[in-house]
Amino acid sequence: MASLTLSQICKTFPNGVEVLKGIDIAIEDGDLLILVGGSGCGKSTLLNIIAGLETLTSGTVKIGDRVVNNLSPKDRDIAMVFQSYALYPSMTVRDNIAFGLQIRRVPIDKQTEIIQRVADMLQIGHLLDRKPRQLSGGQRQRVAMARALAREPSLFLFDEPLSNLDAKLRVEVRAEIKQMHERLGATIVYVTHDQIEAMTLGDHIAVMKDGVVQQLGDPQTIYDSPANLFVAGFIGSPSMNFLRGKLAAVGSGLAFEAEHEGRHVPLPLPAVPAAAKQWVGREVILGLRPERITDPDSRQGFNTLDCRIDLIEPTGPDTLVYTKLNGAKVGCRVRPGAARHAGESMLLAFDMSRAVLFDPGTESRIR
């Protein structure tokens, strides 16, 4: 395996559209990097540049100690798993897995050993003599992964490999990819638009928008401390609640002023530096995750408000309820059965210790 270093990667298409704008990312040997973002953010273009399928306009791609800018895909020592599986329909599973080994003139006995090993790892040993048309979507994706594993490359590239699978299979294959990574210590770059995949799979996540990495970090840091409004809204399901309002002085501290039933109610913020006193009256956007607004239960020290419930969505282990504050829809997670009927009021507790503030002008987090 090998490390990956991307330095000032820029890509401009012939029509003048700049799709990548100075990307800087470095991961260590054995890391799993997730490139996540909405359609058109540049994540697949970046993956194709790493693979050598797209030429870059400027910048440097290093795999291990080698600068690979001018190397063809076959010379970069990579293996790629595509969204569309890309299996040869006339070949058996065995022959699909063996194809790359045959091109590299690996001895037959060694091929047999490798095929059996990767097939056992992905639980497709009983499918080796079948053709792709005889397989389910999940089985085909396992074969595509086995073909990549058989190569034993320095770097694995996954291009939205679970997009064509149904919800149950996505969960199963996602777990297999995670287990494979942990067993092999493989270096992987994984592209997805699904933030659940990003959170559950990645050692590092690069959140992209408009050809720029908005934030690079480990999943929990990105979830708890988003760099800006885009990251905060993109990562998390349901997404973070955003409330526009002002900061007010409360005792020796600060509070976010919430508008509730025609009156202004202060939601005190945790300890802030003395210099923050100058922020009184400042316009801010408050970010608070749904799980930080819940039914009081036995919690102490939370700020509580009696809120009218507009919508109830039972999910099994918990219930999502929606209310309104400052004219905005607010999602909350409560215990099953805590909310009974839409239109009723219930007491909700706000955990302001996990609140995040954003600047309405720059949309960046106020640190």
Image (cartoon, rainbow, N blue to C red):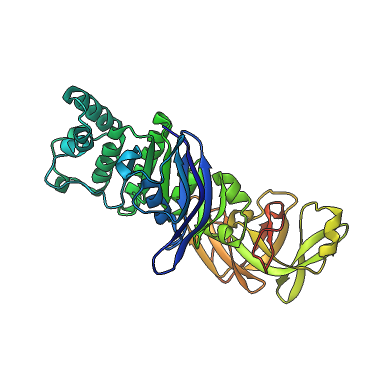
Q: Quadrant of the C terminus?
A: bottom right
Q: Quadrant of residue 106?
A: top left
Residue 279: x and y in percent read 81, 64
Is 15 situated above or below 138?
A: below
Horizontal placement of 149 versus 46: left or right?
A: left
For the view shown, which residue lies furthest in the left direction? Answer: 90
Say which of 302 and 207 sits in front: 207
In this image, 131 relative to 180: left or right? left
If the image is split into quadrants, where does the N terminus sit? top left
Residue 158 visible somewhere in the drawing: yes
Residue lying at the far top in this picture: please name it: 109
Q: Farthest residue in the front direction?
A: 70
Report the front residue among 341 and 43.
43
User: In x, y percent, where is residue 243?
Assistant: 65, 67
Q: Nearer the viewer, residue 153 or 235?
A: 153
Residue shown at the point (59%, 54%) measured from the top left: 291
Residue 238 appears in the picture as rendered = no
Where does residue 269 sit, x and y in percent of width and height? Answer: 76, 56
For residue 177, what is the image quadrant? top left
Q: Is residue 72 left or right of residue 251?
A: left
| Residue 152 picture location, percent across and down | 32, 32
State left or right for residue 110 relative to residue 62.
left
Q: Residue at x 88, y 59 (%)?
A: 251
Question: How many labels, in total?
Answer: 0
Q: Is residue 202 above or below residue 255?
A: above
